[in-house]
Structures are given as C-alpha cells and as structure tokens.
Amino acid sequence: MNNIDEYYSALERLINNAPIIVALGTKISYDAVSLEAGKSKGSIKKSRPIFTDLIRKIDNLKTKRKDNDDINLKKLRFEILELKNQLDNSLAREICLIIELQELKKSKQLT
C-alpha cells in the first residue's frame, strides 16, 4: 500500500466511524487521520504537495460536519424551548389544581 493510500484509508475509516487505532467518535482532523494511518501527529502538512488533495478532503469534511453540528444545535435549542414551555404550562395547571383543591376543602369544612 502506498504511503498516501494509508492516509486515505485512515480517512475513510474515520468517516465510517470504524477506526482501528484512534477512539470511536474521534473528530476528523489532520492529526486524527495521521494517527489512524499509523503515523505521528503533525505528519500531514500543508507545505507537502503530496497532501494537497487529502487536506482539501479533510477540510471539506470538517466544514460539512460543522454545518451539520450547527443545524443539530439549533434543533436541540428549539426543542429545549418547547420543553420549557411544556414544563411551565404543566406547572401552571398544577398550581391551578392545588388552588381548586384548597377551595373545595374549605367549602367542605364550612358545610
């Protein structure tokens, strides 16, 4: 296997979340690809022309993942707001029921 092919294989394993060397769920970065390829951190350098295409692919993946993370974060924030509203409504209903229960107990004691 060619030296650069090891890096591409490592990148594919990270994309598929099936790494052999680094931990599962490791974010894709130059260092993560280097380590997964069995090389040292920092072995992927922009100054080395052989890595130009690999660096472009890694950067594109990082951008796509960041965009997806931003979308997911917005969805989760919206869901949190909805859940807070539901909680507030539930608490308001409970307070109304407690007040109603107290009024019923008072009216029962009067009769």
Image (spheres, rainbow, N blue to C red):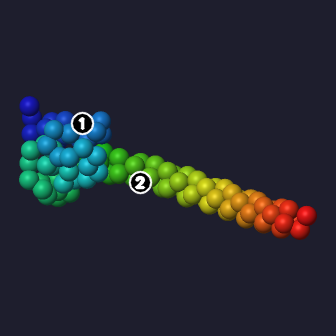
Above or below for 16 versus 70 = above
Residues packed near mark 2 inside 10 Å, few (<14), some (14 to 19) or many (20 plus):
few
Compared across the picture, whether 85 is left or right of 2 comes to: right
Quarter of the image for residue 109 reads bottom right
The numbered disc on residue 18 is: 1
**Mark in the foreground, 1 or 2:** 1
Residue in the picture at 61% in, 55% down: 83
Q: Which quadrant holds the N terminus?
A: top left
Residue in the picture at 71% in, 60% down: 94
Q: How many marks?
A: 2
Which residue corresponds to mark 2?
Answer: 66
Quarter of the image for residue 103 reads bottom right
Compared across the picture, whether 73 is left or right of 98 comes to: left
Confirm whether residue 108 shows in the render. yes
Instruction: Give the x, y percent position of residue 50.
Output: 16, 46
Instruction: Give the x, y percent position of residue 92.
Output: 73, 63
Residue in the picture at 68% in, 62% down: 91
Residue in the picture at 89% in, 68% down: 110
Q: Amino acid at mark 2?
A: Lys
Instruction: Give the x, y percent position of residue 104.
Output: 83, 62
| Separation of marks 1 and 2 at Cα, in angstroms | 20 Å
Compared across the picture, whether 31 is left or right of 58 comes to: left
Front-lying residue, 65 or 88: 88
